[in-house]
């Protein structure tokens, strides 16, 4: 039996980066989800503008996880 292994992101997309799209802000989609505009680059060249679309709950989870990384629990104000 042969087993297939997923490529790592580095092997699948060499020299790629993702950045927030300059001049565009987070907005609601027609379906009421949140869209975070991103720009994809490969080798320093702009390849595409895309949006990371998420539900409000997914956005809340993302904000919570980012907050935990940016501000350790010992520095956060008590709830």
Image (cartoon, helix red, strand yellow):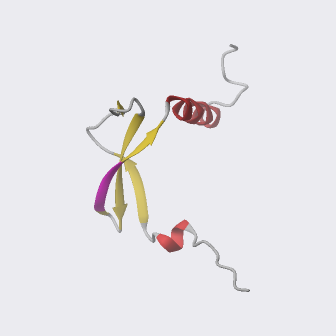
Q: Which residues are magenta?
A: 46-50
Q: Position of residue 62 (x, y in %)?
A: 56, 36
Q: Quadrant of residue 2?
A: bottom right
Please say if 79 is above or below 36. above
- Residue shown at 30%/57% (left/top)? 48
Q: Quadrant of residue 32?
A: top left
Looking at this rendering, what residue extends furthest in the top direction?
79
- Residue shown at 64%/33% (left/top)? 68
- Residue shown at 53%/66% (left/top)? 9
In magenta stretch: residue 4: no
Looking at this rendering, what residue extends furthest in the bottom direction?
1
Q: Position of residue 14 (x, y in %)?
A: 45, 71
Please say if 17 is above or below 54. below
On the rendered image, what quadrant is the C terminus found in?
Answer: top right
Q: Is residue 14 or residue 28 the one in the foreground?
A: 28
Please say if 13 is above or below 66. below
């Amino acid at each position: 039996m042969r087993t297939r292994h997923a490529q790592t992101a580095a092997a699948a997309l060499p020299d790629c980066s993702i950045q927030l799209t300059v001049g565009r802000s987070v907005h609601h989609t027609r379906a009421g989800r949140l869209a975070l505009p991103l720009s994809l680059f490969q080798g320093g060249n702009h390849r595409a503008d895309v949006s990371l679309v998420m539900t409000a709950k997914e956005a809340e989870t993302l904000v919570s996880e980012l907050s935990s990384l940016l501000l350790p629990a010992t520095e956060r104000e008590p709830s």
